[in-house]
Image: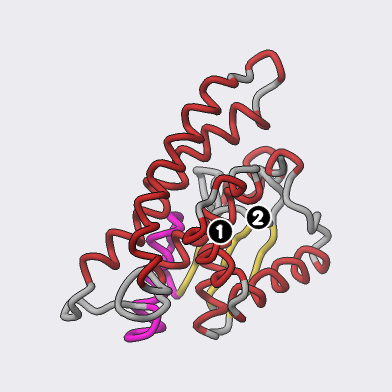
Amino acid sequence: MIKLHHCVSARSFRPLWALEEIGVPYELKMLPFPPRVLARAFMEVNPLGTIPALEDEGVFMTESAAICQYLAARHSPGVLDVASYERDFGRYLNFLHFGEATLTFPQTLVLRYTHLEPPERRQPQIVEDYARWFHARLRTLAPLLEKQPWLCAGRFTAADISVGYALMLAELIGLSERFGPPIADYWKRLSEREGFVRAMRAQEAAAQAQDVSTVASPKLRP
């Protein structure tokens, strides 16, 4: 059975959401955030100390967008996946990695210099600069989302999960108030999907059962 190591509402939510959309059985192992500090035994699973970590029949993966691509291709071909022969294959791959490399990266700096660093090391100018960077790149999606409900291939795909998590993180760290109407509507569609709702419920139930806080780390909240 697939095993996913996960922290509440962290990047590992991407593969959790994908698993719930696909409907394959999996085991959810909850960890406190950050696990490299609060769950040192996890380093034996992933020496990087980062989440997600996914195990599937000898396969071990740690990159959230790559895990979504893997799950979609292996367990949801033609649905969450976009095949190489489909017209939107390139667009699919681009948006799948855009969600992490372009949208989540600047948010990690906002998070660090707003919540993770001690007060004397916080940098309001860095926070503002990278918040603007995030929104400038996010706004490039608005013209597309004014014309269609999902990013590519005429259907909801793993690319929407990847970008959708970046919007979820933006809400957690206080950046969602600057969403333009097409982005806000897109986030509403995403967060109302049954797969998203099931993933939220799954992490809460697993956290309660495993005695891990069901609230995102205070450092992840504005």
Locate residue 84 relative to residue 204 in the image: left or right: left
Dot 1: what SS? Answer: loop
Q: Is residue 189 magenta?
A: no
Q: Amino acid at mark 1?
A: Ser
Label 1 CA crowd tier, 10 Å (few <14, some 14–19, many 20+): many
Marks 2 & 1, CB-CB < 8 Å contact: yes
* Viewport quadrant of the N terminus: bottom right
Locate residue 178 relative to residue 156 in the image: left or right: right
Q: Residue 126's x, y, as percent?
A: 51, 23
* Viewport quadrant of the C terminus: top right
Label 2 – label 1 distance at C-alpha: 7 Å
Give the labeled residue for mark 2. 7
Residue at the image position 53 percent from the left and 76 percent from the top: 19
The range drawn in magenta is 57-80
Give the labeled residue for mark 1. 12
Q: Nearer the viewer, residue 165 or 39?
A: 165
Q: Amino acid at mark 2?
A: Cys
Locate residue 189 relative to residue 155 in the image: left or right: right
Residue at the image position 38 percent from the left and 84 percent from the top: 79
Q: Which of the two discs, 2 and 1, labels the residue nearer the N terminus?
A: 2
Q: Residue 58's x, y, as percent?
A: 42, 70
Q: Residue 214's x, y, as percent?
A: 79, 58
Residue at the image position 55 percent from the left and 52 percent from the top: 51
